[in-house]
Image (tube, grey):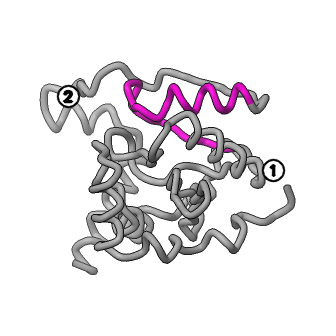
């Protein structure tokens, strides 16, 4: 695996046929999807705001085709999880994370998995995704058919957050290191705006 944290250079930009907002609008009119907001501008905003730490630039694009027809768009970046580098699906947690399969989901998933095989020095991380994400059945079948090993975990069953009774109870539960970090961030925001 070496020291590299970059994906192949050929993936640096979305292909010309989907690079403009109008191209995306036409593509998504032809291939309707509930994930229409997942466009290059969404991933560029995510990259500008959140890449750092475990994530490494740039966002790269895997765009398999059948002839001239685009069958999938998968934005990837390198993510380091417990010391292991993955070519990982970009974006925040579901429902704001996902990718597009156009036309026949089975065929699109098989073509996408075949192209993912070219990222041999990385593992591939597509989650977390919502359990009812419509791309999952086709992707599971395509990975299985191609002989990949898959690991699936339930990350959470709901979005309920247990809040403490008061700010004082919350602060009392934090360690000194976390409190020091919070003060430093607060002071930085005061200085930088």
x, y (%) of residue 144?
Answer: 70, 25
Q: Residue furthest left?
A: 166
Residue at the (29%, 22%) spot, across then down:
158
x, y (%) of residue 132?
Answer: 37, 25
In which quadrant of the rendered view does residue 157 lie?
top left
Which residues are drawn in magenta? 124-145
Magenta segment includes 130: yes
Magenta segment includes 139: yes
Of 80 and 110, the residue lying toward us: 110
Q: Residue furthest right?
A: 2
Label 2 or label 1, whichever comes before in sequence order: 1
- Residue 33 in the figure: left or right of residue 57: left
Of 193 and 50, the residue lying toward us: 50
- Residue 165 in the figure: left or right of residue 188: left
- Residue 45 in the figure: left or right of residue 52: left
Can residue 166 be seen in this snapshot?
yes
Instruction: From the image, tell me which residue sits under label 1.
Output: 120
Q: Is residue 155 above or below residue 68?
A: above
Quarter holding the N terminus? Answer: bottom right
Decide: marks 2, 1 in contact (CB < 8 A)? Answer: no
Quarter holding the C terminus? Answer: bottom left
Residue at the (57%, 70%) spot, across then down:
58
Of 65 and 149, the residue lying toward us: 65
Instruction: From the image, tell me which residue sits under label 2.
Output: 163
Can residue 77 be seen in this snapshot?
no
- Residue 40 in the figure: left or right of residue 4: left
Q: Secondary structure beneath disc 1?
A: loop
* Few, some or many residues within 10 Å of mark 2 (<14, 14–19, 20+): few
Residue at the (48%, 21%) spot, across then down:
154
In which quadrant of the rendered view does residue 60 lie?
bottom right
């Amino acid at each position: 695996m070496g020291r590299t944290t970059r994906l192949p250079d050929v993936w640096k930009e979305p292909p010309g046929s989907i690079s403009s907002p109008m191209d995306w609008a036409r593509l998504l009119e032809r291939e309707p999807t509930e994930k229409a907001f997942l466009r290059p501008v969404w991933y560029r905003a995510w990259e500008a705001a959140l890449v750092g730490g475990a994530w490494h630039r740039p966002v790269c694009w895997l765009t398999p085709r059948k002839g001239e027809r685009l069958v999938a768009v998968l934005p990837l970046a390198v993510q380091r999880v417990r010391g292991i580098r993955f070519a990982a699906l970009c974006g925040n947690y579901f429902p704001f994370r996902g990718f597009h399969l156009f036309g026949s989901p089975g065929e699109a998933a098989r073509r996408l998995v075949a192209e993912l095989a070219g990222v041999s020095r990385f593992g591939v991380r597509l989650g977390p995704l919502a359990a009812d994400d419509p791309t999952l059945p086709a992707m599971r079948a395509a990975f299985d058919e191609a002989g990949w090993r898959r690991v699936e975990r339930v990350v959470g069953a709901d979005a309920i957050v247990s809040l403490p009774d008061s700010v004082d109870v919350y602060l009392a539960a934090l360690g000194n290191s976390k409190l020091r970090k919070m003060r430093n961030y607060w002071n930085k925001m005061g200085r930088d705006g």
